[in-house]
Amino acid sequence: MQLKKLERENISSLLGYFKNQNTHICNYTAGSLFMWGKYLSTHYAEEEDCLVLCDRYVGNRYFYWPLSKTGDAATEDRVAEKIEKFCRENYIRLHFTAVPRDKLPQLVLRYGSDVHVSNIRRWRDYLYNASDFIHYPGGRYSGQRNHVNKFKKNYPDHTFSVYTPADYAEVESFLREVSAVQLEKAEMLAAEEMNGVFDILPRLEEFGMCAGILRAGGRIVAFSAGEVCGDTLYVHIEKALRGVQGAYPAVAQLFAQTFAQNVTYLNREDDSGDAGLRKSKMQYLPVQLVDKYNLAIHRSFDAISAYPQITTPRLVLHAIADEDAADFARLASDDALNRYWGYDWRENATEPNPPPSWFLEDVRKDFKQKNELPLGVYFENKLVGEVVLHNFGYRAEAEIGMRILPEWQGRGFARESLIALMDYGFIKLNLERIEAKCFRENTTSAYTLKAAGMRPCGEDEKFYYFYKTASM
């Protein structure tokens, strides 16, 4: 899977993914992505006719639930597994964001009990019955009806028309007037929202969006725009002039009467924690506050802050000591020794011949970042090799690897170290599965992995694959 930056020019090519989605979450719409994606540094990929979206925020990546063009749940599940694999292979912490409620149970069950789930109130969308906005029925909506009637009485010449590109200059001028008042709040979100409104205005047709203009007294007094996805009309823009009483409930009703006749719901997005906006949205009697779940998947290794010490009949496994930096550098930089290690130290080195301390700091950094658990293998207080748990997954799995200095090979240290670290992984880290691979031509390594109790589980043109579970 290859993630690419979602540029605004890409969004129109992705409309097929949004049109049939029934998540009832505004984050899965073209309008929301266009207006807010640049602030979230959104990236995307297309896999098996599914759209994968990923926001980058405060150093982390947050993946959306995959959107299938056809709504195929099985395909979405497979692509969700690809997201997990992508994160594991690239040492990315797995986070999901804006997860629909019906997808939550399977994710929690998939990743076990160590999952942090949040559902922040200020980001929940307000979902309404479209028919309620079309009719403002009964006593429940008497307030809205009264405001609309007052507006009609005060402005008998009012009209509502469908927006066309010919209206662009007039609508932009109206929005400038609204913006001047809104930006008096000096709130960052208010400024970002208005920037998004002005940016999307010339592209409403490109995104297949619907928009309407409410005029009264010879001028525009309100404007609204949105898009239909599945059974829902998402209202992305709704602006009215301050001081024009009843303009908001009037444009909301006229917009629904014009564009929501063939949908079941209206999504009027979230309130961003604004108290006034929350009160207003609640007065329109939502049928649901749409949950948007955020999941942070934890691994037991994430809680380890200090290197363990593991003893065997002959060996001690522990953090590599400063005084062993030279021997470790020899272990890590020997090309003949490491041709099967699968990693070339030169990829990270900042100079052609780094000092021995650099190799030690490199593996310590990997431990600090929770990318791997590297332990020195010691025999009679002498460093003889290294054994590593790495490539930690999100369903209690990890990969193991080890290497021994040439002068200490052939004494069974590799097998003994592998068994000891696997036992630690199963008992202390609660791993369920430990995996390994070796190059096909590395017959010594394949023999050692089998001798340590690992079973073959596959092969390709490059590697043999092995595994061991907690119950084996």
Image (tube, helix red, strand yellow):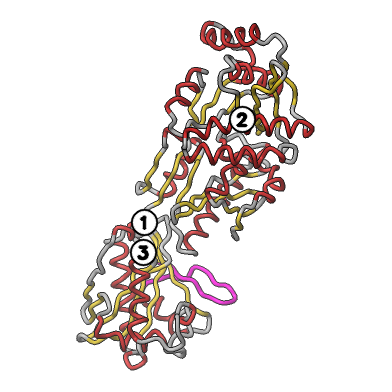
Q: Which residue corresponds to the image point at 66% horizontal and 21% vertical from the top-left?
A: 256
Q: How many residues crowd around disc 2 within 10 Å: few (fewer than 14), some, or many (20 or more)?
A: some
Q: Nearer the N terminus, badge 3 or badge 1?
A: 1
Identified at 34% across, 86% down, the residue is 356
Q: Is residue 143 left or right of residue 411?
A: right
Q: Earlier in the sequence, mark 2 or mark 3?
A: 2
Q: Are marks 3 and 1 in contact (CB under 8 Å)?
A: yes
Taking the spot 63% from the left edge, 32% from the top edge, the residue there is 175
Residue 103 visible in the picture: no
Q: Nearer the viewer, residue 392 or 45?
A: 45
Q: Which residue is mark 1?
A: 299
User: Which part of the image, by quadrant, shows the C terminus?
Assistant: bottom left
Q: Let me know if residue 459 is in the magenta part.
A: yes
In the structure shown, which secondary structural element does the residue marked by tag 3 occupy? Answer: loop
The residue that disc 2 covers is 177
- Residue 411 horizontal side relative to residue 172, left or right: left
Query: Which x, y percent locates residue 386?
Result: 33, 79
